[in-house]
Image (cartoon, rainbow, N blue to C red):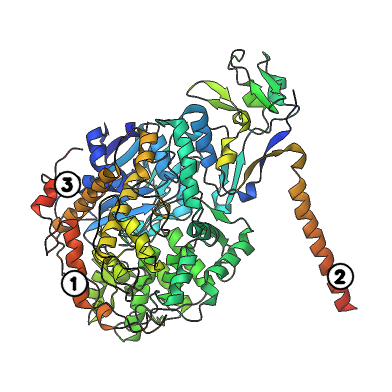
Amino acid sequence: MQSNSKVLLINHEKCTGCRLCEQVCAVRHHGASNPSRSRIRVMKWEMEGLYVPVSCQQCQDAPCLNGCPVGAISRNEELNRVEVDYDLCIGCRTCVSVCPFGAMHYNAIDRQVAKCDLCDGDPQCVRFCDVKAIEYTDGGDVSIEKKRAAALRLSTVKKQAMALEQHTA
Amino acid sequence: MALDRKIAYINLTTGDIEIKPIPMEVRKKFLGGRGLDAYLLYNHTKKGCDPLGPDNALIISGGILCATLASATARTHVMAKSPLTGLLGSCNMGGFFAPEMAWAGFHHLVIKGKAKRPSYIYINNGNIEIRDAANIWGKTVTDTQWAIHDELNDKEVKSLVIGPAGENLVAFANVMTGVKNAGGRTGMGAVMGSKNLKAVACRGTMDVKITHPVEALEYNKKFIEQITGAKVSQTQGTLGTPFIWGATNSWGGVRTENFRYNQLEYADDIEPERIDEIATETMGPYHMSGCFGCQVHCRAQYKIPSGKYKGKYDEGPEYTSQGAFGAEVGCRSAETVLAGNHLVDQFGMDNLETGSIISWAMECFEEGLITKDQTDGIDLRFGNDEAVLEMIERICYRKGWLGDVLAKGGIPASKDIGKNSFDYLIQVKGMNNLHSDERATPALALNIATSSRGSDHLRSRPAIDLYHLPEKVLRKIYSTPVPYDGPLSSEHTEYVGKPWQVFWQENCYMAVDSLGICKYHTTFLGATLPNFENWPKVLYLNTGIEMTPEEIWQVARRNNMIERLFNLREGATRNDPEKGDVLNHRYHDEPCKRGAIDVIGRYIVKEKFDKMVDEFYEHKGLDKNGIPKKSTLKELGLENEPSHLL
């Protein structure tokens, strides 16, 4: 079995706050439009124009997995995700309380914990996000765009410094 | 499922609340949203009721597709008898309120009576509670919403609120949600204020079941691609609606200095590119935001870059603010447009009406109909930026003689100002025009003259008429879902074929307003966007209702007819200068002074205009006086209104 290193990459700056990700997540998993069932939620600070989608990071050393008293949470290497075995889960919500991101969710209608399962490799939130605020990308590439942006900033500063030097000389 | 959402009747005088299901028969006849609201208004108000009295019915709704997977099912509609026009009051807005109301269990609220003290309604998963709003009264639009968050200790609550303008019964006060989603036009905020109702707050975690979820998800993807694939949607997603202002001003379709000119010259500072530059400078490269589920994201975020309001955050501006606080008042400063936009958003008043009424007052001032004493010394001339911002505040708080007079709306104000001030008022049915100048575009002129809520572009405007599309393309659009083999013209200055286009658009916009989706997702600005042919599938996959394009068309016709029945009941007649389907005389008497070569010198020829109205009435099934024929009412199943199905 070849292990998968793809991860969900969220760039909140690009998010327009439309919450379509929440809607398609709930429909994909429950056949219903209902953000309270969505495994991804957009947190908003409306007066600052700040919208931040929050979802499971599929942690390597996952607190939910470590904290589960009945061993219902495990790592699936094939899909590079942390998953819940509902046959073992006792619904104690320990995972909800230990998750540092609030990404382990408790669904009050089904009385079940729920988390992002990456839609088994075809995340619908990614598919529907037109502005690419959420991407499904190779784990090794997560910082390449940030590197590029940083490099551009550095180069601009350098050029400005050179121009200033010539100007003052 | 969407169809199990309910209707609630709330009486603020007695505190009685009644909750009912919405029968399938009613759904199939009116769908929901604006269409069903019109039916409810006709059935739940009596002829001649006082718009600001307890008997007026304030109706709040989402469309039948609200919160489902049909791309941007975000729209909230509010209807009541209008305090501005005395006729049909109606406003529609984006944001996140209606979906939250659907998750809380409701599609329609009918609110009557008057609360004894400032109150707000809280709806949570099927429960409705009337709560005290003493601590919230007086607050601005956004502060009100955050105060409700604090009081309910829940930041996910979505509220529809009024600002100070609604409390002060300004005749064109808005209902608002979020930072800038505005239910503008016709003063629905004043109706809320008159009921002592500061807000309706919703929180819901109930499923809106999708009938065929897998297929609905797939079809939604295609639907979105059809919408975002259009160039016009992409431009809108980058520059927002300001791009429309820029394009329209370039050929001379923007009302300038009230109605003196049809183009604002030297307007670089308020062009869309400049507005975009400010948004980028203050909010970074990714500064567009969207309503619920929408991939067009046409709304910019910005901070005011300079001046008295420097650093204040807001969203927009829409092209209407470039018109209202730019061209109409003869100002050319981005700062004024952005600050004006911010003030009306926070006060909760209509930017179109506010800018328009100030520009009218400016022309009256320059013509000597308003004196400096009456303005408390303000030099109310065109191009006085400071005076514009000052007047916005004076109208909201009804400060000074003129502020209080203008807050009553155009026609009552013209009676207070007197002389021939009414001649300068650019209005239809008592509602002022937006910033567009329709003297060169007969189709658009017919649209504003016959719109059911008074002068308005969002009821029946064939905006694609401006694109000079080949006749073949026009015929493809305008001969479905019902056949049309009459004339059509690609020429926007023509009169032939336009009545059919206006009639078709009227039905198209009524359909989207009843479905609960945004006009930017249909044949409004883009010729390739979805319409009647695409809606049956969306409706079926999401709700299970099976309807043909022709049946949806027929619902739209029916809903439009109820709006006309309401206006007729409240005294509208064809040629009444205050309530009729007519234009200000200046459309016919004053030719365009600026603009493109085929625009300069144009005006609306009265005889040709009257013929267009005749033909439009024929398409609608009305007689020469604009009254529905018996056969039309029978065909639409409206011969026994009010029928009290709900």
Q: Nearer the viewer, residue B425 or A125?
A: A125
| Mark toward the viewer: 1 or 2 | 1
In whole angstroms, how far apart are the C-alphas of marks 3 and 2?
76 Å
**In the picture provided, is B287 more to the left or to the right than B36?**
right
Q: Where is residue B513 in the image (x, y as percent from the top left)?
A: 33, 49
Q: Residue at x 45, y 33 (%)?
A: B215
Q: Could you tell me if residue B372 is visible in this image?
A: no
Kind of residue at badge 3: Leu
Which residue is farthest right? A169
Q: Mark 2 points at which residue?
A: A162
Which residue is farthest left? B630
The disc, 1 or 3, on the residue closer to the chain's N-terminal end is 1
Q: Position of residue A24 (x, y in %)?
A: 51, 36
The image quarter containing residue B604 is bottom left
Q: Could you tell me if residue B479 is visible in this image?
A: yes
Q: Mark 3 points at which residue?
A: B636
| Mark toward the viewer: 3 or 2 | 3
Q: Mark 1 points at which residue?
A: B610
Q: Is mark 1 on a helix, strand or loop?
A: helix
**In the picture provided, is B568 more to the left or to the right than B76?**
left
Q: Nearer the viewer, residue B167 or A92?
A: A92
Q: What element carries label 2?
A: helix
Question: What is the crowding at mark 1: few (fewer than 14 residues within 10 Å), some, or many (at least 20)?
Answer: some
